[in-house]
Structures are given as C-alpha cells and as structure tokens.
C-alpha cells in the first residue's frame, strides 16, 4: 500500500519539529507517495520546517480546517490517504495496524487510533487516568491520525464547513450514510502534544467559539441539572481517584477549571449552537451489544441479586443481570423509568433487544442508504 499524507497548518512551527519525525518513523518511505501540507497563511517558519521534512507546501484558498482539508483532498491521487494535525506524536505501529485494518474490508472508509495528551504532565495525568478508567469512549474520533479510503471520502462529500469544529463528526456520519464504516482502534494510542495546561485552556475556548454543534452520547445533556453537575466537575469519586493515582495536587485543580470553563460556556445562551447526538452505525451497534453481553451475571449465582426480578423487556422472571459498558460514554437509558446502569432480563436475546433500544436512544443511529 502506497499512500498520500496530508496535513493543514497555521503558525504551527512550535509543534511541527516534534510531530513530523514521528510520522516519518511510523510510515515507511516505501509506503509514502506524496506529503502534502496546506498552510493557512502562517507568519512563523512553519513552511520552512515542512519543506525541511520533505513536504510539499500549498497555500490554502481560505483559512480553516475544512477548507484546507478539502484543498488537500483535491490533490490526493492515491487509493488511500492519511491526515494528521500539527500536534500528533504518532505511534510507531500506526501504519502497520491501520493499513492492515482498512485493507481487510472494502466497506471500511476510515480507520484511526486514539490520541492522549503528552507534553504537559498535568494534561497527561488527567487523560491517561480517563483512558485507564474507560471514561474516554471507545468510539472517540477525529480527523487526526486517520487513514481513509479516498473514494469513501469523496463519495461522502469531503470535509464539511457546516461547523468549523466538526468536520470529523459530519464526515463520519456521511460515511455511514454512504454505507462505509469508520472504525477506531482503541488499543492504538498516539500522543497529542500540549506544552502546558494553559495551552489546553486556550484551545478549549477557541474550539468552543468555533463550534456550532456540541456532540453528545447523552440525550439528556441539555438538562439544567446535568449541565450544573458537569460545570461543577462531574462525579466527585472520579476526581478523587484521579488525584490519588496522579499524586499531583494540580491535577484536580486543572480538572475543575477545565470542566467549569466548558460547562459555563455551554450554559450561556447561544442562538446558533445546538446539541447533537453522536452518529453510530450497525457495526458499532453490534460492538455495543457484544460488550453488554460480556457483562452478564447469573442472578441465582449472585447472592446480591438473588431476588425475584422481572425482565425489563417482557416482564417474565429474569435470570440474568447486565451492565451498560463504561466505555460507551455517558448514556442515560430511557427504555423504562426504573432502568439504570444495570438491568435484569430473562435471556441473552432480550438483553440484545434492551441494548439496541438504549443504543438507539443515546446515539444518532444511521441506517445506510
């Protein structure tokens, strides 16, 4: 497999010297066709650094990730291409894993790994703990460290400028509509460089200002009580565990500041902003059902649950208890007023039905055309 590699830049010199060598190490030269950088008019030495690392630099007709990404898409001439942002610290195994995955099925339109903060010890401690605790959803996505099937991107309409901060979420949904899969390899972790906490603070403000949509796996995310809880830091047990494991006092302080910043901004009235559910397809539905099934516990063999329970699907006597998997986001089941993170059913088949109902309530389920 020989691929084109694309990136988009704007005053990116401070991170490119760390980022570009990791891309060169992960993608062998014999698998690289063109390296295309579309710059949005940088005033620093971004273009010089790119050329030193063998990249062709193109001037963007208009600044902004969707515009720059589409300009790069128009230049790509390989069957597959990869996109990277200017602050990725790429996993050395990235190309080997991604090329094998996307080549395994013609209906896979995009594959990617997970990014976790590196550089800032504070941000790194926060996100590494979230990853270990499975609080980063296993469906997390971006347009950074992604390997695409070029035809799939073009048939899905390219990178939309409908929301300047959501080219990834919109393209992903459009791929589902075009019958392509977008798969995240949760075990393949790359770095996402942040110099310090204050850099992340500024980035979060800029992203919130650019965003037209707020994406959520929680259909109740617009409620005032939940927004208030999020603004105040969320579950205090999580913050306590994060603090104990990191052994750094600044970690909970940074966490509360970032959550308060985000929660406060979302609580303010914005006429042009709206909450959207994350798009999902059949592949993710099957993965969700599989994760639910793997949590099965026999009621009679568990003294804690050895009580007469009714199946939440058919009301017959239940035999099993299942749990909603943590790694799928903050899902609030709406199947039944009494259902929570754990539910009882009479059979694995009814567990699948309950899981499907919860999944379709929580996410924007896309049936392919």
Image (spheres, rainbow, N blue to C red):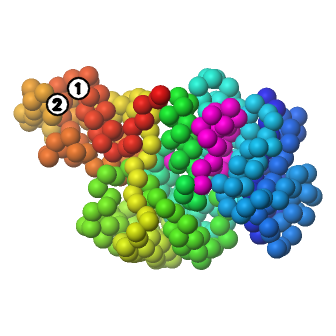
Give residue 285's quadrant in the image.
top left
Q: Is residue 116 magenta?
A: no
Near-viewer residue (38 or 348): 38
The dot on residue 358 is: none
From the viewer's perspective, tell me whether residue 154 is left or right of residue 129: right
- Residue topped by disc 2: 313
Residue at image x 80%, y 67%? 41
Decide if residue 55 is in sight here: yes
Which quadrant is home to the N terminus? Answer: top right
* CA distance for labels 2 and 1: 6 Å
Q: Is residue 253 above or below residue 350?
A: below
Quarter of the image where one finds residue 199: bottom right
For residue 321, side relative to residue 9 (left or right): left
Please tell me which of labels 2 and 1 falls first in the chain: 2
On screen, residue 173 versus residue 277, left or right, reads: right
The stretch in magenta equals 140-161
Residue 232 higher or lower than 151, as above or below: below
> Which residue does the numbered mark 1 point to in the structure image?
350
């Amino acid at each position: 497999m020989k691929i084109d590699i694309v990136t988009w830049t704007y005053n990116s010199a401070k991170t490119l010297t760390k980022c570009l060598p990791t891309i060169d190490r992960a993608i062998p030269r014999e698998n690289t066709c063109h390296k295309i950088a579309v710059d949005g008019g940088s005033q620093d030495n971004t273009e010089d650094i790119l050329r030193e690392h063998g990249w062709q630099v193109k001037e963007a007709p208009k600044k902004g990730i969707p515009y720059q990404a589409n300009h790069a898409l128009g230049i790509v001439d390989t069957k597959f291409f990869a996109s990277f942002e200017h602050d990725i610290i790429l996993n050395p195994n990235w190309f080997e894993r991604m090329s094998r995955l996307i080549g395994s099925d013609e209906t896979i339109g995009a594959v990617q790994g997970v990014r976790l903060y590196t550089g800032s010890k504070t941000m790194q401690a926060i996100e590494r703990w979230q990853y270990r605790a499975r609080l980063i959803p296993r469906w997390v996505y971006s347009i950074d460290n992604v390997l695409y099937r070029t035809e799939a991107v073009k048939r899905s309409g390219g990178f939309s400028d409908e929301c300047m901060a959501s080219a990834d979420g919109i393209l992903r949904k459009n791929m589902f509509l075009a019958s392509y899969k977008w798969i995240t390899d949760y075990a393949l972790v790359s770095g996402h460089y942040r110099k310090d906490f204050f850099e992340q603070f500024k980035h979060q403000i800029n992203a919130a200002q650019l965003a037209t949509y707020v994406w959520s796996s929680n259909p109740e995310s617009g409620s005032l009580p939940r927004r208030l809880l999020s603004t105040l830091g969320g579950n205090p047990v999580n913050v306590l565990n994060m603090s104990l494991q990191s052994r750094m006092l600044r970690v909970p302080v940074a966490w509360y500041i970032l959550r308060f910043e985000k929660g406060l901004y979302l609580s303010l009235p914005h006429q042009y902003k709206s909450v959207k559910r994350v798009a999902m397809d059949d592949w993710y539905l099957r993965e969700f059902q599989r994760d639910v099934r793997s949590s099965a516990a026999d009621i009679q063999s568990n003294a804690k649950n050895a009580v007469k329970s009714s199946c939440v699907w058919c009301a017959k006597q239940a035999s099993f208890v299942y749990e909603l998997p943590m790694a799928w986001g903050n899902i609030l089941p709406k199947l039944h007023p009494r259902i929570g993170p754990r539910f009882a059913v009479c059979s694995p088949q009814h567990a699948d039905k309950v899981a499907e109902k919860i999944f379709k309530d929580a996410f924007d389920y896309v049936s392919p055309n």
